[in-house]
Image (cartoon, rainbow, N blue to C red):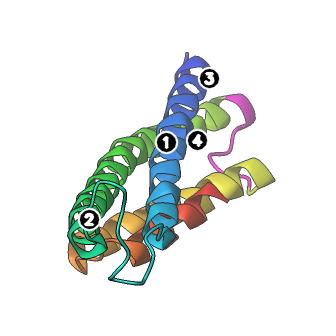
Amino acid sequence: NWLVMHVSIIMASYAVLIVGTLLAILFLAVNQLDMLPQDNTTQYTEGHITTQFSALYTKQKLQLLEDLDNLSYRTIGLGFPLLTIGIISGAVWANEAWGSYWSWDPKETWALITWLVFASYLHVRINRNWKGQKASILAAIGFV
């Protein structure tokens, strides 16, 4: 049954896309986070100088940001084909039920807008090599 297939795949795609988008939002939050003092002479109780700690912190933060960005990209890359299949199966079901593949009702229109946002995200990641903040902002728009 097309309806069962459509609903199942759309729900799975939205779940995966929400996870990918939340990872992109987490990337943006971590990217803005700066918990270290700016004074390079401050000492901690262990006696380590802030600049040594700062270098380690910066390296770990950059690795975390890279991991979040990559995981978000892969997750959205999984959810997008599911959304595509879900929209197509919904159109086939709508044609069987109502005699029209597309009727521009709000649910269909927002599904198309969501598809276009994530298609744009994947396009700029692949063709323009956008990574990091710009790509995460575009992915976050898909959450809206």
Residue on which the image places disc 3: 3
Residue 6 in the image: state x and y as whole percent.
Answer: 56, 29
Q: Which residues are magenta?
A: 97-103
Mark 2 and mark 4 residues within 8 Å of each other at the beta carbon:
no
Mark 1 against mark 3, which lies toward the viewer? 1
Alpha carbon distance from label 1 to label 2 = 32 Å
Alpha carbon distance from label 3 to label 2 = 56 Å
**Mark 3 crowd level (few <14, some 14–19, many ≥20, 10 Å Cα):** some
Residue on which the image places disc 4: 91
| Quadrant where the image shows the N terminus | top right
Q: Residue at x 56, y 39 (%)?
A: 14
In the rendered structure, find residue 50 and report the number of the disc placed on it.
none
Which residue is the extreme one toward the right?
106
Residue on which the image places disc 1: 19
**Label 4 is placed on what type of residue?**
Ala
11 or 143, which is in the foreground?
143
At mark 4, the secondary structure is: helix
Residue 109 seen by the camera = yes
Mark 1 and mark 3 residues within 8 Å of each other at the beta carbon:
no
Residue on which the image places disc 2: 53
Mark 1 and mark 4 residues within 8 Å of each other at the beta carbon:
no
Residue 21 in the image: state x and y as whole percent.
Answer: 50, 53
**Mark 2 crowd level (few <14, some 14–19, many ≥20, 10 Å Cα):** some
Q: Residue at x 66, y 51 (%)?
A: 102
At mark 1, the secondary structure is: helix
**Label 3 is placed on what type of residue?**
Leu
Mark 1 or 2, nearer chain start = 1
Q: Is residue 143 left or right of residue 45?
A: right
Mark 4 or 3, nearer chain start = 3
